[in-house]
């Protein structure tokens, strides 16, 4: 096929030998299957912000730190240079997360580098060597659903232990090969401690996984892994080896406003009585 304009510099530099075909086009990027020497890999070409349909990107950018003051000011002003810096951060967030997740034992495509807005990474394949399907295109037995869901919860715990939330996790951002689920699409990864929307995004991610797998394993529909994991995280006790139950009980301790007001009034009356006794003594 004709080599896309954004990939041509990689061909010129010998990083990519040939573009075999387009694999998919999404809201944030177009992915191609490329030949790199003897290896067949993926080339993820990020779309420019003006052409990207990813909603509420500002919510995901919250908490991302920019060390260079000049860059931060440019981004705030929305200048051309600032937009370029924002794009670089958007792309590097995914690359950084891929390396961190792989090191933590979370299955993601192996990254081979990002060059001018093009991320070269491993092509995840099925048993026949074809591109692995996304989770939303896969049917499974109840046993398989329970197993893969448990694996996803393990990955989610490991991610949060690193202080990172996927932010857009769903059946469309998970591939499935012979070994199980593989997490993809991470440019919107969220800092769990620095983003005010972190908890909401985290619970949504976990709930998306529950809803999908519960189609095949109905017992999962009543689980509350999201609340359980987040509560352990907030307590400071979450580790990559944390064991989960899927159970969570909401606090039943509710403030009794009338009782509180009665206690306040009683204390006030007692203080007034004390002051009155002092005045009488004088």
Image (cartoon, rainbow, N blue to C red):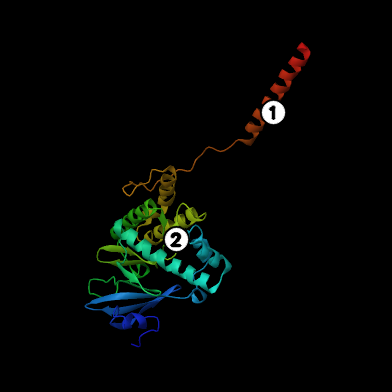
Mark 1, other Cα within 10 Å: few <14 / some 14–19 / many ≥20: few
Question: Label 2, label 1: how many angstroms apart (C-alpha)?
Answer: 47 Å
Mark 2, other Cα within 10 Å: few <14 / some 14–19 / many ≥20: many
Q: Where 230 falls versus 174 (above or below)?
A: above
**Is 83 displayed left or right of 148 in the figure?**
right
Residue at horizontal 23 percent and vertical 71 percent from the top: 127
Query: Which dot marks residue 167?
Result: 2
Asked which secondary structure carries label 2, the reply is loop
Residue 147 in view in this figure:
no
Q: Where 29 falls versus 231 (above or below)?
A: below
Q: Report how many numbered discs are placed on residues in the image.
A: 2
Residue at horizontal 53 percent and vertical 67 percent from the top: 75
- Name the quadrant containing residue 74: bottom right
- Name the quadrant containing residue 95: bottom left
Q: Residue furthest top?
A: 281
Query: Which dot marks residue 265?
Result: 1
Q: Residue 160: where, in percent of width, then height? A: 39, 53
Q: Residue 121: where, in percent of width, then height? A: 31, 71
Q: Residue 280: where, in percent of width, then height? A: 78, 13
């Amino acid at each position: 096929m004709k080599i896309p304009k954004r990939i041509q510099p990689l061909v010129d530099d010998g990083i990519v030998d040939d573009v075999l075909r387009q694999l998919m086009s999404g809201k944030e990027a177009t992915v191609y299957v490329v030949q790199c020497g003897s290896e067949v890999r993926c080339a993820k070409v990020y779309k420019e912000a003006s052409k990207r349909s990813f909603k509420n990107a500002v919510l995901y950018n919250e908490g991302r730190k920019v060390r260079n003051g000049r860059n931060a000011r440019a981004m705030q002003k929305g200048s051309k240079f600032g937009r370029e810096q924002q794009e670089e951060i958007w792309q590097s967030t995914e690359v950084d997360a891929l390396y961190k997740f792989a090191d933590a034992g979370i299955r993601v495509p192996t990254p081979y580098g990002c060059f001018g807005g093009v991320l070269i990474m491993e092509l995840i394949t099925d048993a026949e060597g074809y591109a692995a399907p996304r989770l939303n295109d896969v049917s499974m037995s109840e046993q398989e659903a329970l197993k893969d869901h448990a694996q996803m919860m393990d990955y989610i715990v490991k991610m949060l232990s690193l202080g990172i939330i996927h932010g857009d996790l769903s059946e469309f951002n998970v591939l499935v090969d012979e070994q199980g689920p593989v997490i993809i699409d991470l440019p919107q990864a969220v800092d769990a401690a620095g983003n005010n929307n972190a908890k909401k995004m985290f619970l949504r991610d976990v709930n998306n996984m529950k809803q999908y797998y519960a189609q095949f394993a109905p017992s999962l529909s009543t689980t509350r892994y999201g609340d359980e994991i987040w509560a352990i995280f907030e307590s400071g006790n979450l580790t990559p080896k944390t064991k989960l139950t899927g159970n969570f009980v909401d606090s039943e301790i509710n403030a009794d406003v009338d009782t509180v007001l009665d206690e306040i009034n009683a204390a006030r009356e007692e203080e007034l009585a004390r002051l009155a006794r002092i005045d009488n003594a004088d």
